[in-house]
Image (cartoon, rainbow, N blue to C red):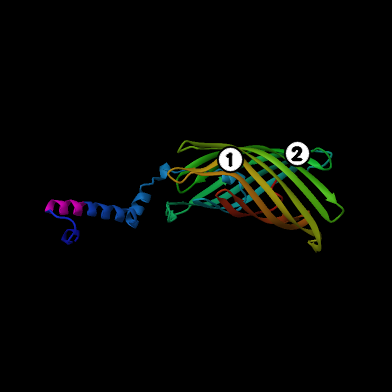
Amino acid sequence: MIWMLKLPGIGSPDQKALFQRLALVLLMSATSINCPVAQAQDQADFDREDIDVSYIYAAIMGSGTYKIKTRRITMLRFPFSFTQQQLTEEQPGMKWYVPVVVGYDGVEVGDRRARLFEDELVTLTVLPGFEYQWALNDTWAIKPFGQLGVTRDFTLDETVLMSVLGVRLRGTWHRGDRTEVRWGAAMRLAAEHQLDSDVHNEFSLWETGVDFRRNIGMRFMEREVNAGIYYRLQYFLPSWNVAEKPIREQEVDGLHEIGLSIGLKKPRKIFGFSFSRVRVGYKRGDGFEGWTFGTEFPI
């Protein structure tokens, strides 16, 4: 015990007692700073109702797995759609879609990356919408679109209303019979409102990118096969607040994505569904990284 030690330089019993008390206080303080039990207690003080997280990623991110600072998000997006009218140079196109997104969201806190919840945040999103397609000429097409839907968080019992409104512009150039180049730009206004916690998030998302494809001299299902590489830049105004205290502040400003694709030069229907292409890409930004996969050029 500390009061049994002989303390050199300390004369009177009162001086010894004072020094012993100070040493005991310092020892207890140092122990509490590094004690795992104390850290666990601090983490237990977090209340689920105090966690402000954003769910709008279900509307703006494709299928994939993403690391956003203290969050690990995995999403599977089912892009159900119906083309009411095919786009041609003579007539505009109309497309309806009902994407269904299943998400698994892991939230971590503390220097040791301890899990805040025992289970992932399991979410289901249904976001129906439309897209009007208008061909300006044989190269350029403009596509305004809108979506309105709902997300349900089954872990936190949270219901979220979502809306997206935007427009895309795409140009397509053919270089002979073997090479295609696409350039795209888009602007989206996205908003969410969490009904139970009364949290509201909104921002604009600006995108641009280029897609290069070239035939590889193979055929599949009686179609020519081409391979490609693409790049996309996404920029948020203002910054997207992914999460706020008591978790560390998480904001995303811009994302870079580069990927590869392979597919058919002309789409082919399989069991009534149109198939043309698969792609995989890598996203990276400030505090953000992950892998994404999908079908066509994402702009």
Query: Which residue: 74% across, 48% down?
Result: 210
Q: Quick check: 13 above or below 235?
A: below
In the image, which is nearer the foreground, mark 1 or mark 2? Answer: 2
Amino acid type of the residue tagged 1 in the rendering: Gly
Residue in front for this viewpoint, 48 or 214? 214
Q: Residue 185, how many percent across, how many down?
A: 71, 42
Q: Residue farthest to the front? A: 9
Mark 1 vs mark 2: which is more N-terminal? 2
Query: Which residue: 70% across, 50% down?
Result: 231
Give left or right: position of 45 versus 20. Answer: right
**Residue 197 visible:** yes
The residue that label 1 is drawn on is 149
Residue in front for this viewpoint, 256 or 76? 256
Q: Is residue 277 magenta?
A: no
Q: Residue 91, how many percent across, how many down?
A: 81, 38
Query: Which residue: 56% across, 43% down?
Result: 56
Q: Residue 81, how many percent across, how many down?
A: 68, 46
Amino acid type of the residue tagged 2 in the rendering: Ile
Magenta-colored segment: predominant secondary structure: helix
Residue 100: give its label: none
The residue that label 2 is drawn on is 142
Q: Which residues are magenta?
A: 13-21
